[in-house]
Image (cartoon, rainbow, N blue to C red):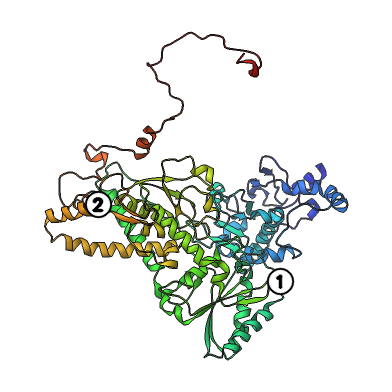
Amino acid sequence: ENTTKNNNRNKVQGQKIEPELKTKFFDDALLLSLQNSKINKNMSKAPPPKLHFDDGSRIMTERSAGAVIESSATTPSSTKLNPRGSTDIETYYEIHRIASEIVMDQCSLPTSKDTDGDKDDDREFLCKVALQFPDELLDDAAEVCWLIEDEIIVQYNEKVKKGGLEFAEDVIIPPLVFVLGDTTYSSCCPDEIGALHLDADVIVHYGQYACLSPPQCLPVIYSFGVLEWAGVEECIESVLQHIGEKGDEPIKLLLLCERRYHQYMETISIGLMKDDAVQEVIVGSVPIHNTKIEQLPTPCNNATSCCKEAATQIQSENEDCCDNQNNPDDGMNIGGLRIPIAQSSLPCYTLLYVGDDSGASKSRQFMNTILRCTSPTNKTKECWSYNPEKKTLSTDPSSLLGVSRYLNRRFYLTQKAQLASIVGILVGTLSQDRFRTVISSVRQKILDSGRACYTFVVGKINVAKLANFAEIECFVLISCGETSVLQDEREFHLPVITPAELDIVLGEKVWGGSDSCNTDFGDFLKDKNEEKQSSTKAQSIDDDKDDENSGVDDESEDDEPFFSMISGTYIAKPTVQRRINRKGIDGRGGDDKPDSQPSEGQMVEYKSDAAEFWKKREYKGLEAKIGQTEVKAAIEGQTGIASDYGK
């Protein structure tokens, strides 16, 4: 070890080091690497030593390499199956492509002063890359981390040379490539919270389980794993054979796939287009999201002046941005993939899904795809699915998934949620773009309906966590498309619904089958903006009506019962307080405003529905009862074996 350490000290940073000498030392995830510059005339201009992070796994692997080889020869492996199989690690994890995208987007070229060594670079690392692996791929995490780090240095050197700058090896800054630990929420979402702990510049998300949701502030590079699939031609022949048996006019296909088969979609598309029976093939692609952190101004203490105007302006800009992103003429997202066709053109295409159609997959991509393509408003002409493992083509995938039974279950939960008077908003993601906008919109809708509302951030969701909140009667889960519907939701004692289903619970929409099970944030916000525009028009009409008549109408609307399919009878609306007159809420009349802020100099009554529920409980926990209990001196209690206390 001492010999290796001395050899590393004499190596010039940036030179190629032999594998046996390329050792890093572990010390609480920090490695202090002293790098000496070349012994030349410019020694005085050499940069200061840099701190370098490393998890210590490389030297630990090298030390235990001999023991692992001996044990593997005598003891069978007990590790769980790795999806990579026998595929080469550099091929499966796309080391070259990942490093190329990182160098192109995150690594800027040095200036002429940097290459001459005249400038002391303030950067600690060339770039900071966070690698996110699912549990089944963690065995390869350390080796992938080393390979990407080395490939980034190699490709950055080539980029510098192509830029016409003379490369100086003694000023190269190494990249920081680290592996994320346990994810904050589901593994399908990029863990921006964990990546920002080390101020990462980009996240590399590995694995087949990915929701492809737009990130909030960090760019994400996806790699689903490159596996060899020998049945591509057989898939093409099966589809063309079925089209030939139908004998209809030339068909238009919408080609979507499971994440692991994404690399073969262009090959399938080209093979299908060679036949005259196929008129057009549209291939779904991984969406490219432009991420940018918006710096908001620091609010002042005056809640009625500049801050309100700035917040209103930012909110309007965000809503306009959402409108532009959800323009139906620009395309749409189905199952996380981007489709470059208008929604109105969807009935002209036949869906062809390549992947696991048995419903046993961990991912909900196929279910979300079928629900979207069988929507009553805009559905595809037909739906086909090809299972590469079974090598079968199905023309009725809805029956394989049990879509009817699924819709019946979701309809039951919406009817049960109508009886709730205290609703909890359950935050299931902190990385998806615009999730705060969805939370605020859902919260406002619940409060406008007269129900009480509380927001919970509990991390990964399970039955035990939600059982702690006995006063909550219904939860609205704000999460990505893959986790908006819990896989084990039948085990929960309360209904857990989506924001789209909340509109049905509040009576703003009627049950529409597959349309009511949409989990896309973009569609929910688009509907919100449409409702806002329609409510603005309705508000202008209500201004012309008599104030007394409008108040009577609102009060009678609050008292109107509704028919519950759970109890089979008419029941009163489950509101904890009567809905306040719209005229007072909007501030168009009356002296008192229910939304008054403490800084406006008005006294308001605070009422907690959760506290009222707690007062009605018989057991309230350990109570001090200060001043109510007689003070007594401490006495010695019973001692001995507990079984003899009663004798």
Q: Quick check: 527 left or right of 99?
A: left
Count how many numbered circles sit on residues in the image. 2
Residue 562 position in % (x across, y down): 30, 55
Q: Secondary structure at mark 1?
A: loop
Residue at 40%, 62% (x, y): give it: 524
Q: Quadrant of the C terminus?
A: top right
Residue at 67%, 78% (x, y): give it: 232
Q: Earlier in the sequence, mark 2 or mark 1?
A: 1
Q: Quick check: 438 left or right of 208?
A: left
Residue 546 position in % (x across, y down): 11, 57
Q: Quadrant of the N terminus?
A: top right
The one of 34 and 503 positioned closer to us in this rendering: 503
53 w.r.t. 104: above or below = above
Q: Which residue is mark 2?
A: 558
510 w.r.t. 431: above or below = below
Q: Which residue is mark 1?
A: 228
Residue 156 position in % (x across, y down): 63, 62
- Given the image, on which type of amino acid does mark 1 rest? Glu
270 w.r.t. 30: above or below = below
Classify 10 Å Cα crowding around label 1: few (below 14), some (14-19), many (20 and above).
few
Asked which quadrant contains residue 630, the reply is top left
Q: Are marks 2 and 1 in contact (CB under 8 Å)?
A: no
The one of 292 and 43 positioned closer to us in this rendering: 292
Q: Quick check: 594 left or right of 202?
A: left
Asked which quadrant contains residue 593, the reply is top left
- Given the image, on which type of amino acid does mark 2 rest? Asp
Q: Secondary structure at mark 2?
A: helix
Classify 10 Å Cα crowding around label 2: few (below 14), some (14-19), many (20 and above).
some
Residue 609 position in % (x across, y down): 34, 39
Q: Quick check: 247 left or right of 304?
A: right
